[in-house]
Image (cartoon, coloured by chain):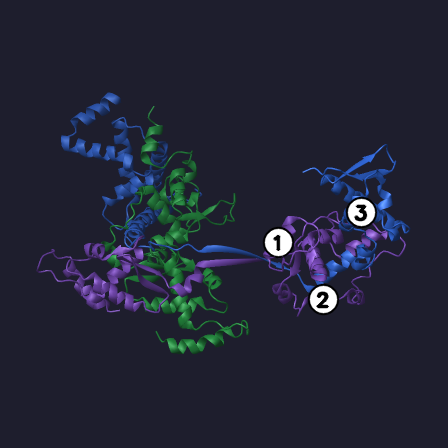
Chain colours: A blue, B green, C purple
């Protein structure tokens, strides 16, 4: 078989062989069997709707035979198409069998013609599309675009009611005692410091700091606690400043303070 | 071009929306649209125009006026889907060698696939393959997606709920189309029934389903597959 | 605008460039300059315009005409060094910004701090902390300063000369107050039912420290806290 076909090729004229080879070489350019059929159909030079599918099937099968002869390996889909066309050819040649179900040969042929026409139409519009004026080739966008600057602004909302509720919340915690009232029972460190600075000069000896409390802060326990704390803090401040010394002999024993004779620098 | 008429029109138009805000006169709105469209290389949607213009503006009307104003000029106001852009007049392309961008040449498969998506959208991969009679390679679709000329559409309500492809506004912009209905020859194709989804009679016709074993649709790829 | 004239002219433009050559009509030259300035990424000099336009063109005049045409429009033909460019009209620059406004609720710490400043101004940070019972974060004060609802007052004449805070006119503006003395007093708050949720007298009121552990809500939340 192989030898035979080889012999056949040998007997072809040079022109025929070139033509055949051109077709074969072109197989690489085909986009599948439908594309090949479309190309073959052009040789019929008729409207695709009136194309002879029978002739087309013959041409295709001949092409596949030739390819075989030249020992060109065809992709499976080309062979599937060949088998289908051979079947279609037989359906078209034989008189229709009324007992057989399914589409007739004519219907199958019509659909193939439709597919070819549709593919051709897509090719044509694709070409028209690509030939249109195109952005970046025929017409152009702005060369110097200005970006839109995104500005994100956050606004905070708060109403007078929010404010009042917040304040009410704070005051509720304080059990409604007005803030200024609080201050009357608070002896601040600043006050203690002022007082001690003026008295420190007299404290050459170790003196219990509880004796430094102002008179009227020694009875009411609330006031006494505040004054004690402030006086102690003020004492530490004076020590830190290098103007006094502080000591406590043991836990819970009196804390004593005396002035430092030679203040540290 | 009849600005005075338009100006008397605009407050009335703005009134129902919000009585507190009065839209700027239409001539001023036209200037605003002009500035925004000039500043952008991309088409700007009516919605974005409205967002950026003062409350109560009517960007659609302002665009229409601007478009008429630029009729026959060196640049034109062009519609791209729901958006608008200013582009140079195509007849002046010869002056623009400096601006021309070399685009990658598309393969034949890509061009055909693009046309099929444009004319048949929304279209599934299987439908593209049926029309071309060959399976569609991943690379072809990827290239078109990357160019942002096609994108995924909704899934089809058929078994398997396959994804579909549709063309994008960038596609329209690139090919100077107002919308997909303006595709060249679309009416003729439709009239000829060539855009119908006509299923093959029976199930005997070789459908792409039998072919698509992951093989590339480029012919070289195919032959390579069978070489050894 | 006068397309027919232009079209009959353009074949002449393709003719060889020599002394016989006739430059395109000025309207056409203006179109060319318009398209080139629009599409160019940089300002274009007259010399470059001349290079790109057909032989015999007068770009200087075309630019002047174009510039006059854009007078008062949304974009303007502007001179940049010795070159020309189309730019947004300066009065429309604000269109090139897209402002997104986000409204957030002021944090509880911030609103409390603000309330304390308003009711006790001038007030030091230490005093605010004393009233709130918790320390005031730098961020909270900074936020209020940034909002321009509080500002620094005079320093207090106490040790350390601490800075004080006072509320601003913007604060009064925002809250619709003539001055800070118009703030409703405790009596008013009570009358308005804002102080009703106090603990029964004599009960062990939880200290502020326990209250402040991230409870975000207003009065109802507090009543719940006190209920058991």
Horizontal side of C202 relative to A58 (left or right) equals right
Name the quadrant containing residue A23.
Answer: top left
- Helix, strand or loop at label 2? It is loop
Please state which of the two labelled residues, at mark 3 or mark 2, is closer to the viewer: 3
Task: Please give the name of the residue rendered at 36% of the width and 29% of the height, measured from the top-left corner.
Answer: B225
In whole angstroms, how far apart are the C-alphas of marks 3 and 2? 44 Å
Circle 1 — which element?
Answer: helix
Give percent across and percent down for residue C28. Answer: 22, 64
For label 2, the residue is: C183
Q: Quadrant of the N terminus of chain A?
A: top left
- On the image, the x and y values in percent for residue B220 come to 31, 33
Q: Pick whichever, A188 or B211, lies toward us.
A: A188
Q: Which residue is mark 3?
A: A199
Mark 1 Cα-neighbour bin, 10 Å: few <14, some 14–19, many ≥20: some
Res C143 label:
1
Callout 1 touching callout 3 (CB < 8 Å): no
Number of the front mark, 1 or 3: 3
- Residue found farthest to the top: A3
| Vertical relation: C141 (above or below) B132 | below
The answer to which of marks 1 and 2 sits earlier in the sequence is: 1
* Spatial separation of the CA atoms under disc 1 and disc 2: 22 Å
């Amino acid at each position: 078989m192989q030898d035979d076909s080889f012999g056949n090729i040998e007997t072809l004229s040079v022109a025929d062989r070139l033509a055949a080879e051109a077709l074969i070489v072109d197989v690489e350019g085909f986009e599948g069997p439908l594309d090949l059929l479309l190309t073959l159909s052009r040789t019929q030079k008729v409207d695709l709707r009136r194309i002879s599918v029978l002739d087309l099937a013959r041409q295709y099968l001949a092409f596949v035979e030739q390819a075989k002869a030249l020992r060109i390996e065809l992709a499976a889909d080309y062979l599937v198409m060949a088998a289908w066309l051979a079947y279609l050819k037989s359906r078209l040649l034989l008189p229709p069998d009324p007992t057989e179900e399914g589409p007739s040969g004519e219907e199958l042929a019509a659909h193939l013609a439709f597919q070819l026409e549709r593919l051709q139409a897509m090719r044509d519009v694709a070409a028209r599309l690509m030939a249109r004026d195109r952005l970046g080739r025929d017409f152009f966008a702005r060369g110097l675009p200005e970006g839109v600057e995104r500005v994100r602004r956050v606004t905070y909302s708060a109403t007078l009611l929010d404010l009042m509720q917040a304040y009410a919340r704070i005051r509720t915690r304080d059990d409604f005692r007005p803030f200024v009232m609080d201050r009357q029972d608070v002896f601040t460190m600043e006050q203690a410091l002022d007082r001690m600075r003026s008295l420190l000069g007299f404290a050459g000896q170790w003196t219990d700091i509880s004796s430094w409390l102002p008179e009227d802060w020694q009875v009411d326990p609330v006031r006494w606690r505040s004054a004690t704390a402030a006086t102690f803090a003020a004492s530490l401040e004076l020590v830190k400043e290098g103007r006094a010394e502080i000591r406590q002999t043991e836990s819970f024993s009196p804390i004593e303070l005396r002035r430092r004779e030679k203040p540290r620098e | 071009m009849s600005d005075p008429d338009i100006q008397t029109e605009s407050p009335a138009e703005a009134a129902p929306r919000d009585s507190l805000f009065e839209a700027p006169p239409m001539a001023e709105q036209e200037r605003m649209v002009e500035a925004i469209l000039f500043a952008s290389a991309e088409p700007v949607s009516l919605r974005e125009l409205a967002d950026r213009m003062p409350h109560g503006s009517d960007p659609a009307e302002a665009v229409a006026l601007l478009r008429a104003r630029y009729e026959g000029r060196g640049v034109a106001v062009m519609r791209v889907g729901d958006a608008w852009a200013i582009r140079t007049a195509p007849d002046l392309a010869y002056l623009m060698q400096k601006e021309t961008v070399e685009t990658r040449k598309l393969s034949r498969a890509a061009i055909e696939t693009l046309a099929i998506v444009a004319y048949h959208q929304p279209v599934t991969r299987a439908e593209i393959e049926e029309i071309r009679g060959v399976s569609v390679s991943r690379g072809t679709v990827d290239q078109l997606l990357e160019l942002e000329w096609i994108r995924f559409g909704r899934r089809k309500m058929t078994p398997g709920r396959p994804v579909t492809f549709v063309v994008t506004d960038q596609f329209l912009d690139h090919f100077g189309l107002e919308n997909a209905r303006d595709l060249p020859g679309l009416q003729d194709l439709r009239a000829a029934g060539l855009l119908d989804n006509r299923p093959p009679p029976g199930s005997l016709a070789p459908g792409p389903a039998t072919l698509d074993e992951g093989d590339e649709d480029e012919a070289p790829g195919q032959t390579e597959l069978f070489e050894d």
